[in-house]
Amino acid sequence: MTAWVKIALRNLIKNRRRSLFTMLAIMLGFAAVNLFGGFTTYMYQANREGSIYSAFQGHLTIVRKGFFENDRTDPLRLLLTAQEMSEIRDVCRPISDVVLVTPQLRLNGLITDGKVSTIFIAQGYVPSSQEAFMKGTRLKLMEPFEGNRLEDDAEHGIGISRGLSRALNLKIGSEVVVMATTAEGQMNALDAEIFQLFDAPSAGMNDRFIRVPFRFAQQLYDTDGAHVMSVLLDKTVQTESVRNQLRNVFKQKNMDIEIKTWNELSEWYTRVKNMFDIIFLFLFIIVFIIVTMSVINTMSMAVLERTREIGTLRSLGLKRRGVLSLFAIESFLIGVGGIAGGGVINLLAWLGINYYKPLWAPPGITVKIPLQIIFTVEFLFYSIGFLLILCLVASLIPARRAANQNVVDALGHV
Amino acid sequence: MKSIIVLNQVSKTYHLGGTEVHALHEIDLNIDPGEFVAVWGPSGSGKTTLMNLIGVIDEPSSGRLIFNGHDISGLSDNDKSELRNLSIGFVFQQFNLIPVLSALENVMLPLQIRGISPSEAKKTAMNRLDQVELSEFVTHRPDKLSGGQQQRVAIARALVTNPHLIIADEPTANLDSKTAMKVIGLMRKLNTSEGTTFIFSTHDQRLLDNVSRRIHLEDGRILEEHP
């Protein structure tokens, strides 16, 4: 251990109460930033996974150009034809990152048990694709459903949201009639059986959302086409590159379609992320101010108390940068101590959460889901690096004052 | 013989608020290697200012100060720090040991500032502590040492770099009579055996009786020199 580290360490121990309070500020700051950071990472992941996998949206959504502009005057124009669906599959197939390409229809209409009817919004999807979606997600956030799976070859079996089942007093096995207008504007109705109950992706849709097999949706809409081709990728990080690849091919083929990424379609995710980013910024600023002020205060006290010592060291030949280093080392050690303590708090919190597995209901979601803290190595390294640099920079203000002191004045300091 | 210190018309003026205080007036002084010199005079006579200038921790307002043949006026702060570390040792009235370091670590400090390895610095420091008869107290911190022991650690620290010059500002002022005599004897012995130049500021008659040259300072001027 060099003399300078020894001096710094022993001075910290000598003034242990003051050092501990500063370390405590850093400790709590580090823990707060990382725990909240871990929570936001979990929230982002939960929302992302929810959008991509739980809602069967996939990473990319391929639609007819103008589909998202909500112009419903010509429903036929918004449909992808069977030939286009086949072409899209052919384009996607050679891309190794693509796991699944599956069609979907988005419908709305009336659902009735023969006595009472109410409106619904339906997602028509290929039931056999559910396996691929559920396999891709790492966060098992929600029980996917209660009851039986929807089946490709049991077209009359549909799933309804729990809110809707309560509204119409429907149970698994209940028979209903689903009515909607076809693509050409005619009324159509099909008999269906409730196969499953599930929680809708958002609370606002829980009293009207249903999922039907794709073939059922095609029959109801009287079409062999689809509104959407959902593309599921191996990894979320590949989203943008695959979109660009597909865009180029579709452009070459002169196809009248557009591709949206999962986050472009998930307004909820973007809003939640923006909100948490702002909260994190506030927390970060508070931690920044507390740590900076604590370190400056501690180092200023140290400089004041050790003015004569600084004069002595300077008269023995220590250069100004040596004095700077001395206080920087002291501040660095405070930072290391604080971060180590904060690390212990983080670990205890993480262990506690994993042991007790607390449940909570995030806003907009109808069920309680497990609370998690997801620490990322990158975030930990950034926060450690930032706090250590902050300690060093904050110590520079008093350390510079110490280094620039007149040696004679410093020696004469009482 | 080339003088180790040459002061040529050196003056020092301090500005205290709106008042100018003339601490030294056009001092001319030569100190040769191996001298054992005391600067004495009443409080406020300019002793400490003179010692600070000779110790290169302060700068003259006018005049030239030559240390070992080099004019120090053109030196940067880093150069002066190096000069102090290589050529000058300091002994302070209040001992000025670093409280969190042991006697040995305090003595090693000037060598470590120079960048000498801890093992070599330790060896040299142990020799110096042995020389001042403190080898049994190497692990003691300053607060566990008596005043005399602390001053002997300070002398060992001043000597550890084999400097050309040791500056001692009132080195016996805080010591009892017996300890003061012991410290004076030790410094005299080191001066004789190693030829190290010592300059003291002092009021202490016992010290004045033991020096080879006395410089009497009053109102910032040299009144007389003996011999």
Image: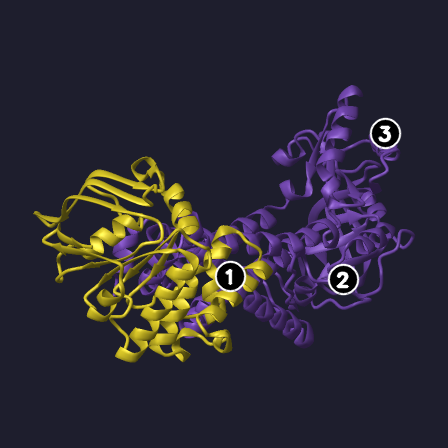
Local packing at callout 3 (Cα closer than 10 Å; few below 14, some 14-19, many 20+) is some
Residue at image coords 38%, 63%:
A298
Q: Position of residue B66 (x, y in %)?
A: 30, 40
Front residue (pair B112, A270): B112
Q: Colour of chain B?
A: yellow
Q: Position of residue B114 (x, y in %)?
A: 49, 51
Of label 3 and label 1, which has the lower sequence position?
A: 1
- What kind of element bears circle 1? helix
Of label 2 and label 1, which has the lower sequence position?
A: 1
Instruction: Please tell me whether residue A106 is drawn above or below residue A296 in the rendered image.
Output: above
- Quadrant in which the C terminus of chain A is drawn: bottom left
| Chain of the residue that carries numbered disc 2 in the rendered image | A
Label 2, label 3: how many angstroms apart (C-alpha)? 31 Å
- Amino acid type, callout 2: Pro
Q: What residue would you read off at disc 2?
A: A144
Q: Position of residue B43 (x, y in %)?
A: 13, 62
Q: Do the CB atoms of the residues marked 3 and 1 lie less than 8 Å apart? A: no
Chain drawn purple, letter? A
Label 3, label 1: how many angstroms apart (C-alpha)? 74 Å
Q: What residue would you read off at disc 3?
A: A87
Q: What residue would you read off at disc 1?
A: A3
Left or right, A271 with reference to B41 = right
Q: Do the CB atoms of the residues marked 2 and 3 lie less than 8 Å apart? A: no
